[in-house]
Image: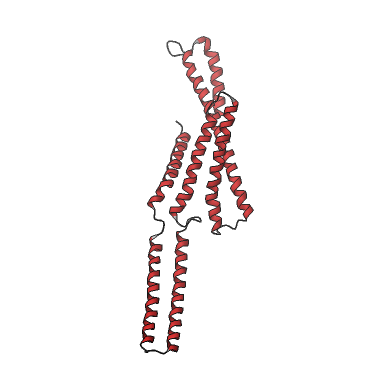
């Protein structure tokens, strides 16, 4: 096996491992970060402090410790202080959510679930599509029928995979895409994936077929050897020509 084939096999294993892991690992990741959960707990104390201050002020009024005008002034002061603290709370909450977000998703958990599952479907569709190209069929109609069906799987899975990235990323304003730009990308990407996978599979299939023929040819030379392992005299000229042709084909 050549280095190229080893690297390709290693890459395929990594892709498959990533897609499978991405579809299940989200179950082990919390939907909200520790910082976000800790910050949300402070809202309860914010409300309690406001209500306690209101209750204490109401008690003072009922016991005639303060006048109505003083009550109203302190009530407004407590309310304004609460609004300022609530504003700071919401600003920090929004900041944490933005830091936790991943490409338009609220967190890594939902990113892996949304993108990973669609990427997994795309990889499965591509494997199915390329296997259809490599197979042999009794009639041309069966081949085209299977190609069309598998091609539709690739187009649909490519569309939803691109949607899971393009639409989400654009929704957070990361890129200033116009609507038609977004739609164009959503429809072009599946076509690019389909065509590139088709021609790459055809190219790879042609290389394998040529390599197989050359191996058969080399193996066939074994039948041209005599008892001592040398080329038979009557086959030497043909062998020399075949060797030159094979060398030229490999180099080219």
Q: Quadrant of the C terminus?
A: top right
Residue 156: image location, x then y, percent: 55, 42
Q: How many marks?
A: 0
| Residue 119 to residue 235: above or below | below
Residue at 44% in and 54% down: 108
Quadrant (top left, top right, bottom left, bottom right) of the N terminus: top left
At x 44% / y 44%, what residue is drawn? 18
- 78 or 136: nearer the viewer: 78
Q: Is residue 160 above or below residue 32?
A: above
Location of residue 49 with respect to 151 vertically, above or below: below
Front-lying residue, 250 or 189: 189
View extreme (front): residue? 62
Taking the spot 59% from the left edge, 30% from the top edge, the residue there is 144
Residue 190 seen from this side? yes
* Residue 252 in view of the camera: no
Residue 214 pos. (x, y %) = 52, 23
Residue at screen point 58% across, 43% down = 190
In the depicted structure, whether residue 182 falls above or below residue 232: below
Residue 146 is situated, as x and y percent measured from the top left of the image, at 56, 32
Q: Position of residue 175 (x, y in %)?
A: 57, 57
């Amino acid at each position: 096996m050549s280095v190229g084939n080893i690297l390709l096999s290693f890459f395929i294993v990594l892709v498959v491992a990533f897609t499978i892991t991405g579809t299940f690992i989200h179950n082990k990741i919390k939907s909200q970060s520790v910082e976000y959960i800790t910050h949300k707990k402070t809202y309860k104390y914010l409300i309690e402090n406001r209500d306690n201050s209101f209750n204490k002020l109401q008690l003072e009024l009922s016991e005639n410790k303060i006048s109505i005008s003083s009550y109203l002034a302190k009530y407004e002061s407590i309310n304004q202080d609460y609004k300022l603290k609530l504003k700071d709370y919401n600003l920090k909450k929004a900041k944490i959510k933005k830091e936790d977000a991943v490409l338009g998703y609220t967190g890594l958990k939902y990113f892996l679930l949304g993108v990973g599952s669609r990427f997994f479907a795309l990889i499965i569709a591509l494997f199915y599509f390329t296997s259809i190209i490599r197979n042999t069929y009794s009639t041309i109609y069966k081949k085209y029928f299977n190609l069309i069906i598998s091609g539709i799987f690739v187009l649909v899975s490519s569309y939803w995979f691109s949607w899971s990235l393009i639409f989400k990323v654009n929704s957070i304003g990361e890129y200033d895409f116009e609507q038609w730009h977004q739609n164009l990308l959503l429809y072009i990407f599946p076509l690019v994936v389909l065509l590139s996978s088709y021609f790459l599979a055809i190219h790879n299939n042609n290389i394998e077929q040529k390599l197989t023929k050359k191996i058969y040819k080399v193996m066939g030379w074994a039948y041209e050897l005599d008892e001592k392992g040398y080329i038979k005299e009557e086959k030497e000229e043909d062998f020399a020509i075949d060797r030159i042709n094979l060398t030229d084909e490999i180099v080219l």
